[in-house]
Structure formats: structure tokens, C-alpha cells
Image: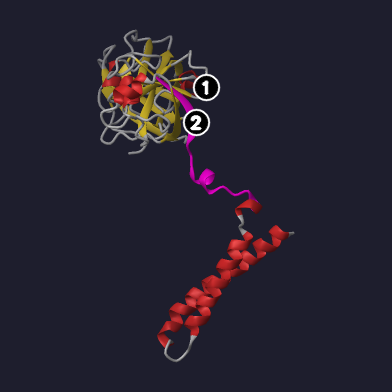
């Protein structure tokens, strides 16, 4: 009953406050003749008093810090070279590009809740540490490019490259932070942003005229891919569904000869956005080659 009364009183006072503000603005023109200013401020004061009474944090169990914060706890370790990119290759299939722009070694292997059986490849997270003296406390962004199957001590675990782990440290204290070995950190999911970089398709070395597989790289936005489809030349109404082979690798085992050029259509996992890279795989394509498109999910 008290809550209902407070909510009703709050709504009433919001209307009164709005009318008071409008009235004050209009009537200030006639301020010297009509004394509206005093009454308006009294009404605002009344509103604030009632607002304070009705929204007592103890009464409503209202925690502002919890509402504003999107950060969640996780565990963190690092692997590979202290200033390296973790492990070239990895369970996503990105290979050596993890050490190059735009990944730039700011990458991480993920436990099962982050790797998601490969669906998590390419997703972006902000991470920060605050509980070690060497922690800077500012967030840095990492991309999931590998799996950490042994990371089971926490429900969420990042096994970062040495570069990414050290980037959470204060200037000149990356060594001290890496020397801690394991940290309790905070993380939050964020959109991926690769300004000026479009989707790239690295053709698997085992591909041929009847079997086509590709790694999708640099997807911005969600970062995660739900479906990939392939369209052959001269078959503009037919999209062939590809299967996730492993990690970020998608495959099509046609059973009949595939006719290039190929267009590829990708749909993101969370937002459902779809992009089409028209004729991105040209006639005369080669296994092991990378072909860049002119599209991406956010531009």
C-alpha cells in the first residue's frame, strides 16, 4: 500500500514539476508583475521532498551501483610468450593473423562459456583488473581466438596472450602483473570495432572444386557468426548452407563441382544482422589465399 501511494504521489509531482517549469519559463516574461517564481521553486522543493521519501533505497532494495554496472567477475591467466600473441593457430583457426593488425596480439583463449564450441570465435570483451598492486584498473579489449579446455576453475575464464594480460598493468609493471600468474578480473561483452577493415575470407588449404572451407575474419558488431551460405555463379536464387567445421571455419561439401565466383552471406549470432560479400571468392581462387570483401556488419 505504501509503495502504491508513493508511486501515485511521484507521478503527480512529476506532472506538477513539468507544469511548474513550463509556467516559470512563460511567466518570467511577466516576472515584475506576477510573482510566479517563488511558487515554482516551492513546488520543486515539494517534489524533491516527496521523491526522497518514496524512493528510500532501504524500502525498495534499490542499488544504483548494480544497475549502472555491467561488469561481471572472471578468472584470468596468460600463456605463450610474455609479449606475444598466445598461440598462433589456435582452436578458432585464425593462424598468424592474431599477431597482426587489427588483432595486434590483444587476444585470449576462452573457457567453454566464452568459446561456445567455436561460436564464440571473434567475440570481443573488455577486461580489467583491480585487485593486484600492478593493476591499472582501466579496461582493455580482447578478442576470443582460441579455446582453453582446461579453464574450469571459474564459470568464466580468460587465458590471455602475454600482450593482453600485460596491458592491464600500470606503466612499467607488466612483468609484475604477469608474475602473479592468475588474477580475478572483471569483464563485459562489447561490440567489435575494426575501423577501415572489412570481412576477410581465408580459404582452407584443403579446399578444392568439390569441397570449400573458409575462415571468416574481422567481423565487427557481435563478432560471432550464426550461419554462412554460399552462392555459385549463375545461380542467383540458390544459397547453399555451409556448416561450421571447427572454430571459425565454415565448410561446404558439395558433392558436385562448385562454379566460382562465390558470394558468401553471413548472419551474426546475436543481432541477426546479415551481410553479403558478392563474388568475394573469384574465378581461379587458390587454397590458402585470403580474399577481402568490401562489407562488414557495422559499416
Q: Quadrant of the C terminus?
A: top left
In the picture provided, is 150 more to the left or to the right than 103? right
Q: Position of residue 3 (x, y in %)?
A: 69, 58
Tag 2 and tag 1, C-beta contact below 8 Å: yes
Q: Which image quarter: residue 181?
A: top left
Query: Dot 1: what SS?
Result: loop
Q: Secondary structure at mark 2?
A: strand
Q: Quick one: 114 or 57, which is closer to the camera?
A: 57
How many marks do you count on the picture? 2
Residue 211: x and y in percent read 38, 10
Taking the spot 30% from the left edge, 22% from the top edge, the residue there is: 175
> For the point 50% across and 33% down, which residue is it?
72
Chain part drawn in magenta:
60-77
Rendering coords of residue 130 (x, y %)? 41, 33
Q: Position of residue 176 (x, y in %)?
A: 32, 23
Q: In the displayed image of the protein, which residue is found farthest to the bottom?
A: 33
- Return the residue nearer the eye: 246 or 29: 29
Q: Which mark is residue 73?
A: 2
Most distant residue in the right direction = 1
Q: Is residue 22 magenta?
A: no
Which quadrant is the N terminus positioned in? bottom right
Q: Residue at x 47, y 89 (%)?
A: 34
State the CA–CA distance, disc 2 to disc 1: 9 Å
Q: Toward which corner of the image does residue 109 lie, by quadrant?
A: top left
Q: Nearer the viewer, residue 55 or 133?
A: 133
What residue is shown with label 1?
154
- Residue 298 visible in rendering: yes
Q: Is 151 drawn above or below residue 43 in the view shown?
A: above
- Upstream in the sequence, badge 2 or badge 1? 2
Label 1, residues with CA under 10 Å away: few <14, some 14-19, many ≥20: some
Amino acid at each position: 500500500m505504501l509503495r502504491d501511494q508513493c508511486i501515485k504521489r511521484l507521478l503527480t509531482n512529476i506532472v506538477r514539476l513539468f507544469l511548474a517549469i513550463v509556467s516559470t519559463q512563460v511567466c518570467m516574461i511577466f516576472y515584475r508583475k506576477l510573482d510566479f517564481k517563488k511558487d515554482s521553486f516551492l513546488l520543486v522543493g515539494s517534489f524533491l521532498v516527496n521523491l526522497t521519501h518514496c524512493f528510500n533505497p532501504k524500502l525498495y532494495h534499490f542499488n544504483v551501483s548494480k544497475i549502472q554496472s555491467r561488469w561481471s567477475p572472471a578468472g584470468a591467466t596468460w600463456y605463450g610468450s610474455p609479449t606475444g600473441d598466445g598461440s598462433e593457430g589456435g582452436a578458432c583457426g585464425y593462424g598468424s593473423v592474431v599477431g597482426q593488425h587489427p588483432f595486434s596480439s590483444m587476444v585470449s583463449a576462452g573457457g567453454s562459456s566464452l568459446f561456445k564450441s567455436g561460436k564464440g570465435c571473434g567475440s570481443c570483451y573488455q577486461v580489467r583488473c583491480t585487485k593486484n598492486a600492478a593493476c591499472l584498473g582501466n579496461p582493455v579489449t580482447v578478442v576470443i581466438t582460441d579455446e582453453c579446455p582446461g579453464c574450469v576453475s571459474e564459470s568464466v575464464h580468460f587465458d590471455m596472450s602475454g600482450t593482453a594480460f600485460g596491458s592491464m598493468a600500470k606503466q612499467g609493471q607488466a612483468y609484475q602483473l604477469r608474475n602473479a600468474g592468475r588474477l580475478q578480473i572483471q569483464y563485459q561483452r562489447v561490440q567489435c570495432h575494426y575501423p577501415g577493415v572489412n570481412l576477410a575470407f581465408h580459404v582452407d588449404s584443403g579446399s578444392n572444386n568439390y569441397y570449400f572451407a573458409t575462415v571468416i575474419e574481422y567481423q565487427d558488431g557481435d563478432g560471432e557468426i550464426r550461419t554462412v551460405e554460399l552462392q555459385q555463379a549463375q545461380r542467383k536464387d540458390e544459397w547453399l548452407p555451409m556448416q561450421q567445421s571447427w572454430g571459425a571455419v565454415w565448410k561446404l561439401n558439395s558433392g558436385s563441382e562448385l562454379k566460382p565466383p562465390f558470394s558468401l552471406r553471413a548472419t551474426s549470432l546475436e543481432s541477426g544482422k546479415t551481410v553479403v560479400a558478392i563474388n568475394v571468392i573469384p574465378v581461379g581462387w587458390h587454397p590458402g589465399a585470403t580474399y577481402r570483401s568490401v562489407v562488414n556488419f557495422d559499416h
